[in-house]
Amino acid sequence: MKREECEMLRAKALSYYEKAGIKLTEEEKRTIEIADFGLNDIEKVGLQSVVYINTERCCAKEMVCFPHQTCPEHRHPPLQNGYEGKEETFRVRMGTCYLYVEGERTKEPAANPPEGYEDTYTVFHEIVLHEGEQYTLLPDTKHWFQAGEEGAVVSEFSTHCYDEYDIFTDKRINRIPTIS
């Protein structure tokens, strides 16, 4: 992703944080992560986030999904260092988040995988989260999520986050952004 595009998306994400009443420090504003997952299709597949803390025991971050933007299907696996995988709770601060997890397939889901990526999504049990609602994912649970019509701001509270070890269903994905 080009640096200019990254800065434009960072400003756009900041406007969502402000709309949701999320106050960020100047340093946090500068370090909003723009993840296109190496697909260069951020309007469909992407995520904007800022990490407040990521210690050995806990992690807290704020995520922005623009309207209909999807965070692709992935899981947080156990690691050889004894880590059991990330347990995470999503709490919606603004908008609607359609979360898909393992379980019985929802017959008429409100969201669908992004066009052109359908074959890389395998879980379709839908959890609809509105403002003020939350859901906890257990470690190593395959999941993906998509914002509704107005986008979404979602707080994540979790055990330590090892983003670089996330396992994505779409093998083309590179979790750590490359900015040029």
Image (tube, rainbow, N blue to C red):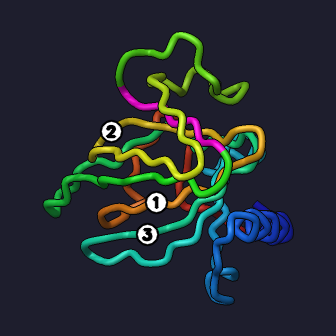
Q: Residue furthest left?
A: 82
Residue 171 visible in rendering: no
Q: Are marks 2 and 3 in contact (CB under 8 Å)?
A: no
Q: Quadrant of residue 62?
A: bottom right
| Mark identifier at residue 141 | 2
Where does the image place residue 117, in percent across and percent down from the top left?
64, 27
**Which residue appears at 49% of the width and 16% of the height?**
106
Q: Residue furthest bottom?
A: 26
Residue receiving disc 1: 156
Magenta segment boundaries in residue numbering:
96-102
The local secondary structure at tag 1 comes to strand
**Which residue appears at 81% of the width and 70% of the height?**
11
Residue type beneath disc 1: Glu
**Image side of residue 12 versus residue 45, left or right:** right
Discs 1/2, front = 1
CA–CA distance in space, label 1 to label 2:
15 Å
Q: Nearer the viewer, residue 57 or 128?
A: 128
Number of other residues with Cα within 10 Å of mark 2, as a class: few under 14, some 14 to 19, many 20 or more: some
Residue 130 magenta-highlighted: no
Q: Quadrant of the C terminus?
A: bottom right
Residue 97 magenta-highlighted: yes
Residue receiving disc 3: 60
Q: Nearer the viewer, residue 155 or 160?
A: 155
**Image side of residue 66 versus residue 158, left or right:** right
Q: Are marks 1 and 3 in contact (CB under 8 Å)?
A: yes
Number of other residues with Cα within 10 Å of mark 1, as a class: few under 14, some 14 to 19, many 20 or more: many
Please name the predominant secondary structure of the magenta segment in the image.
strand
